[in-house]
Image (cartoon, rainbow, N blue to C red):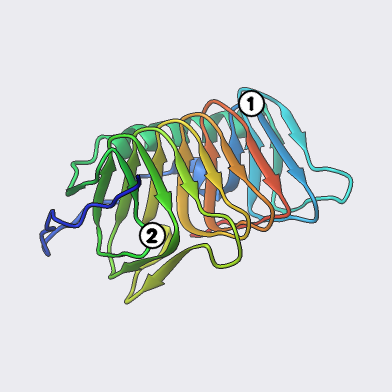
Amino acid sequence: VIVSATSIAQSNAFAASAPNLGTANNFAVLAGSTITCTGAGAIIGDIGVSPGTAIVLGATPCTVTGTINPGGPVASHAHADASTAFTNLNAATCTTTEPAVADIGGQTLTPGVYCFPSSAAITGNLTLSGNGVYIFKIGSTLVTAAGPGASNVILANGASASNVFWAVGSSATLGTGSVLKGTMIAFTSITATTNAAVDGRLLAINGAVTLDTNKISVIG
């Protein structure tokens, strides 16, 4: 049974700083081992792999508006900066602690640090309301629901994708047709299924990023 916590109040005075992404800031997609993109996807921003070197854009192909970095010093530096940002995100003090297994779909959240001891899911609309930093610290996996309109992160009242961060302790799966906002940094891998869209970044520290007809747009 997936439940969601609503009983822990946040302070309206909450303020947190967004982590410094360093050179990873320019990357829409960054992986530790492999990037694979199938279908007519579009990546707006740089992509890179380090310490791996494999980037497979497919026969369709998946288009990249930015620099492609299959290994090399640029990707290596970005990978190091993403790893540091992941560490800093996980050091943030929790303002709300969710249950071990939590679905935060259907909620309206204000800026804060939301901590999930185990897994997290988003089913339906998740509204982030208010100007400020949103940090989601997830112990293991993040899964967004599949299907048109089945999972959608909505920004309201001054919330910005550039201030939304998802720190995933293992791997993330973005369901078919789902919409995510913000920078996702996963310790292992990220899979975006058909037509999932991201206004932000997908950064996988140790594993692969697997894409299928997605639009990934890096934000400032």
Query: Where 24 falls versus 199 (above or below)?
Result: above
Residue ID at (56%, 59%)? 178
Circle on res. 23: none
Q: Position of residue 127 (x, y in %)?
A: 36, 67
**Quadrant of res 191:** top right
Query: Where 61 falls versus 220 (above or below)?
Result: above
Comparing 71 with 189, the one in front is 189
**Seen in the image, is 42 located left or right of residue 11?**
right
Q: Position of residue 64 (x, y in %)?
A: 74, 52
Amino acid on which the number 1 mark rests in the picture: Ser
**Quadrant of res 1:** top left
Q: Residue furthest front?
A: 1
Report the number of numbered marks. 2
Q: Residues at badges 2 and 1 in contact (C-beta under 8 Å)?
A: no
Query: Where 134 falls versus 47 (above or below)?
Result: below
Circle on res. 105: 2
| 3D distance between C-alphas at marks 2 and 1 | 31 Å
Point out the frontmost of discs 2 and 1. Answer: 2
In this figure, which residue is indicated by the disc labeled 1? Answer: 33
Q: Secondary structure at mark 2?
A: loop
Comparing 157 with 4, the one in front is 4
Residue ID at (87%, 51%)? 60
Q: Position of residue 104 (x, y in %)?
A: 34, 55
Q: Residue furthest right?
A: 59
